[in-house]
Amino acid sequence: MPSPRLSVVVTRRLPEPVETRMKELFDVRLRDPDTRMSREELAEAMQSADVLVPTITDQIDAALIGQAGDRLRLIANYGSGVDHIDVATARSRGILVSNTPGVVTEDTADMVMALIMAVTRRIPEGIASMAGGNWDGWSPMAFLGSRLAGKRLGILGMGRIGQAVARRAKVFGCQVHYHNRRRVRPEIEEELEATWWESLDQMLARMDIVSINCPHTPSTFHLLNARRLKLMKPSAVVVNASRGEVIDENALTRALRAGEIAGAGLDVYERGNQINPRLREVPNVVLLPHMGSATIEGRIEMGEKVLINIKTFADGHRPPDQVVPGML
Ligand SMILES: NC(=O)C1=CN([C@@H]2O[C@H](COP(=O)(O)OP(=O)(O)OC[C@H]3O[C@@H](n4cnc5c(N)ncnc54)[C@H](O)[C@@H]3O)[C@@H](O)[C@H]2O)C=CC1
Ligand SMILES: O=C(O)C(=O)CO
């Protein structure tokens, strides 16, 4: 007798081809309408399903995992960051966790470059001027930004996205520097012509642009804090398309106001979509609504990764993108 199909609950709407394939393969409950699940709805889903497919805005904490039903065996996250899932508690309950790394690397690196260009070349100001109909023609001194070529870019977190940013920045003529938990392989350093800094503090003090590309973990929480922001050059710019918690947002706001750094470009925030109102008021900040990976191709490939993770698990193997505590 064929084994019964796995019961899967998906917490948000996904691209149509992904949902169609989910229906073909599993006994799936899809989300309709496309709103976030409440905590009660998540708890109910975790009681009734074999597999939960949450996204990065669902807080799957120890309490929720503690209440999960015995049949929940896999949390197959739709997203690469897993800082919203208590992976250690899941493991202690024998629940596997998987994610979708690698498929949005290029898209997110593109958006990092867009943020760098937006801040250093004042693109939002130009757009606002045109939209407001108050541009009165070219002027030698209008909208002066700073040149990217020749600038030092310091990448904090030289993993997949960090390296994709480095590749782009090199083409733009930047000098690439990086700080990472571990030094990357020599051939990668050579390809990127990248300089490794063992000391984050020393790197920060010398960079023109800093791009944050490490995950949010206990060791990266507020890595860019008030003390480190003070080390940076007053002309420096910071961009963050990883997770908001890596920067102390209050300290960043103060540093921008005090002119300790020149600008910031953010795709992610410390409290999700609860944007610090003071951040909106400071000049030289470009704020994006967590859209670093938002391409249709990337979203479909994320879904394909989720499908492969669940299918492999259903076939009795470990999902290829299994996340284990401490691996990030
Ligand atoms: N804005 C967006 O839409 C997206 C954001 N992300 C975020 O970007 C993060 C990075 O993604 P990937 O590059 O694919 O991850 P990755 O795992 O390939 O690279 C992360 C790098 O950070 C380094 N790292 C970790 N802790 C560190 C520490 N304390 N100090 C210095 N380096 C440290 C790791 O050694 C690794 O090299 C994800 O965890 C996710 O939070 C990912 C995709 C899209
Ligand atoms: O995958 C992630 O971690 C994101 O932030 C969105 O793609």
Image: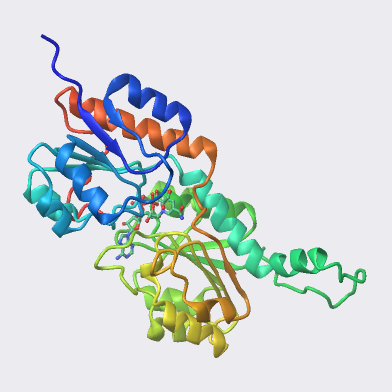
Q: Find residue 188 and report its horizontal and vertical position in percent.
A: 43, 48
Residue 247: x %, y % from top left: 40, 73
Is residue 132 rendered to the left or right of residue 174?
Answer: right
Residue at 53% x, 37% y is 296
Q: List the single residue furthest toward the right.
A: 137
Residue at x 52% of width, y 46% of height: 294
- Point 41% across, 78% down: residue: 202
Q: Which of 50 and 295 is in front in this view?
A: 50
Is the N terminus in the top left, top right, bottom left or bottom right quadrant?
top left
Q: Where is residue 97 in the image (x, y as percent from the top left)?
A: 21, 44
User: Which residue is the extreme one toward the top?
Assistant: 1
Give the image quadrant in which the ligand numbered 1 is located: bottom left
Q: From the image, which quarter does the C terminus lie in?
A: bottom left
Asked which colour scheme the image uses, the reply is rainbow
Please tell me in which quadrant of the rendered image residue 72 appears.
Answer: top left
| Position of 9 relative to 36 (above/below) | above
